[in-house]
Image: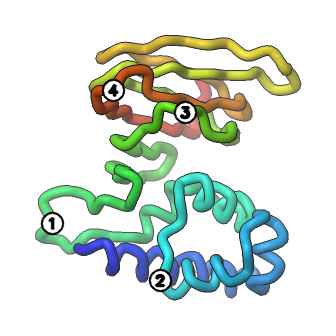
Amino acid sequence: MNLKDVDVQLGTAIRQLRHRQGRTLVEVAEATGLSHPFLSQVERGRARPSMRSLFLIAEALGTTQQALLASVSPAPEAAEPPLLGEGTRLLLHQEGVDVTEFSEIGTEYEEFFTHARPEFLYVVTGHLELETREPGDTTSTFTTLAPRDSATYPGNTQHRFRRLTPEPCTILMIHSDHHP
């Protein structure tokens, strides 16, 4: 499956969910802080949302990034899940658990993410710095992770990460409905 097909399938899934909820593009744009024209381009498969934009869209539509990414199904003969842009692959989407691979991690922090479900982060390659904040706290905890290291944090924890070294960094992010 090529990236254009992925973009079209993802956009179609977003549009269908928005229509099922009876919402307009303008309403979703206001809820996400993204522009109406950009969302229109995403829904038509003419623009690829960043993981940050997909997170905002999913939140506005009451779902998860993984649920939206799962709508992009590879052909049955595909040897591996499709690359979804920004070095992201949804490896598993089943009842109660999602496994996502990230392989293009920047050296600068982006905005915090917050998800309702607990997360488990596993570093496959490279070195990563993880910043977390407990709900309602303004103090951050910084954790340095090397290959084969992992970290877990409960749902609603603000978190973000960055690559520490020039070498590529690949991580697996597991979201689970089961609380540790």
Q: Is residue 3 visible?
A: yes
Left or right relative to 23: residue 54: left
| In front: label 3 or label 1 | 3
Q: How many marks?
A: 4
Residue type of the residue flagged with mark 3: Glu
Mark positioned earlier in the residue sequence (3 or 4): 3
Q: Which residue is mark 2?
A: 46
Disc number placed over residue 138 in the picture, else none: none
Mark positioned earlier in the residue sequence (2 or 1): 2
Residue type of the residue flagged with mark 4: Pro
* Above/below status of 151 relative to 176: above
Give the SS element for disc 3.
loop
Give the SS element for disc 2.
loop
Q: Which residue is mark 3?
A: 108
Q: Which residue is mark 1?
A: 78
- Around disc 3, counting alpha carbons within 10 Å, would you say few (fewer than 14), some (14 to 19), or many (20 or more)? few
The x and y percentages for residue 63 are 65, 60
